[in-house]
Image (tube, helix red, strand yellow):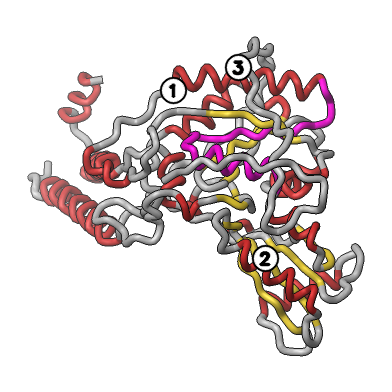
Amino acid sequence: MVRDAWEDRTMPQKPAQNRMKRCAIALAACAAMLGLSAAALACSVPVFRFALERWQPDKYLVVVFHEGPLDDDAKKLVAQCERAAHAERSANIEVETFDLSEELPPHIRAIWDREQAGDEAKPKLPWCVVAYPQAAQIEKPMYRGPVDEAALAASLDSPLRGEIADRLVSGQSAVWLLLESGDTKADDAAHELIASELKRLEKELKLPVLAEHDKELVKLNLPLAIKFSLLRVKRSDPRERMLVEMLLDTESDLAEISKPMVFPVFGRGRAFYGLIGKGISSENLTQTAGFLIGECSCEVKEQNPGMDLLLAAPWSKIEGNFADEPLPPLVGLPETKAIKTSPREASRKPIALNERPRDNLPMQADAAPKAEENPSPMVVPMAAPTHAYPVWIVSLASLAAVGIVVLLVGSFWISSGSRPKH
């Protein structure tokens, strides 16, 4: 290769060809320098920990439609929902009421129009809609129905969602949810494989070495370690109907697929894209876990794949609560710490909005023999990390790159043009 380069340099060629080659070399050099600059600015905090400390969960909109004054029962339930949004175990919701006899904001009018236009049961006032966060870009509501205490409570929280929150607050890297298909043989095989692989990955994966300038971003009094756990979710469990609905809504066609699916949940309840059927493989589990354990590169949450789940969690009790601090000079976003909450006793009565039963949760299985890997795994492409740096750094790097390009191209062009003609 050195010989080829030398021959190119010494053999007579047309000036235009020389200039093209030199321009290509200049552009390649600049690209390499930009790559080195980005690497130098990368954040060494693992994705799962950065997400726990810095990413506030997206809020679901709880809308109550009515005409005329709300009755006392509806007022009571609206007040309970508002308390649930600010309780010790707060739900990531915003609660609003709208009188249909008054003019509605455009986005609320769009929700109401869809409710009236659907093929399902027509709204009977007062009527409640729990809409997905705007960032999820899902038009269908997570819940639609009467302003009913039991239904609203089931929308805001559930036993498994509470367990997920407690595990994340305790410092686990990710809680993997196996959404069962109903085929016992396929579900058990998927569970066996996932449990075995997660134990292997806990031992084999390595955390990034935390750079000195990034240590101030890790403020939780929690060990920074790789810890995974696994929970099984039955599609037929009435208590987890809303959790199942949210997982299936992470992609538009999942509800049509009757195969086992696994979703890692990390940070403050962000569900990563699921692995499905044959896609639940050693290769894909390793790739997904590697992303969660890898360097966060100070990524903005909205530029990451996945969707925030609606759950009630004690995020406000995590020591520090740094989410709303101003950005540090070189790296983005801040916030948080952890407490463990004891499980509440099971209850057979309807779930109150400020209570949550925590009984009969499927815990992580002990080490199981590794299931036979699928011979033709479906590799799920991972999204490329998107860096979010302060504007002045990006601008400076861009100007420097343009300057270098102009300097190199200009010098080559001039030197080429100044040669004597033969």
Note whether 4 is above or below 76 in the view shown. Answer: above
Taking depth in this image into account, of 374 and 362 the one nearest to the observer is: 362
User: What stretch of residues is rendered in magenta?
Assistant: 158-184
Q: Can residue 314 be seen in this view?
A: yes
Q: Mark 3 points at which residue?
A: 196
Residue 166 magenta-highlighted: yes
Residue 373, picture quadrant: top right
Q: Can residue 20 be seen in this view?
A: no
Instruction: Judge left or right: residue 400 versus residue 174.
Output: left
Residue 138, picture quadrant: bottom right
Label 2 CA crowd tier, 10 Å (few <14, some 14–19, many 20+): many
Work out which quarter of the rendered image holds the N terminus and state it: top left
**Residue 4 position within the rendered picture, expressed as x and y whole percent measured from the top left:** 24, 22
Mark 1 secondary-structure assignment: loop
**Residue 267 position within the rendered picture, expressed as x and y whole percent measured from the top left:** 50, 44
Taking depth in this image into account, of 313 and 103 the one nearest to the observer is: 313
Residue 216 magenta-highlighted: no
- Decide which of tag 1 and tag 2 comes sooner along the chain: 2
For residue 81, the mark is 2
Q: Name the residue under label 1.
A: 205
Residue 195, picture quadrant: top right
Note whether 173 is above or below 121 in the view shown. Answer: above
Answer whether labels 1 and 3 touch (C-beta < 8 Å).
no
Question: Which amino acid, mark 1?
Answer: Leu
Note whether 99 is above or below 9 in the view shown. Answer: below
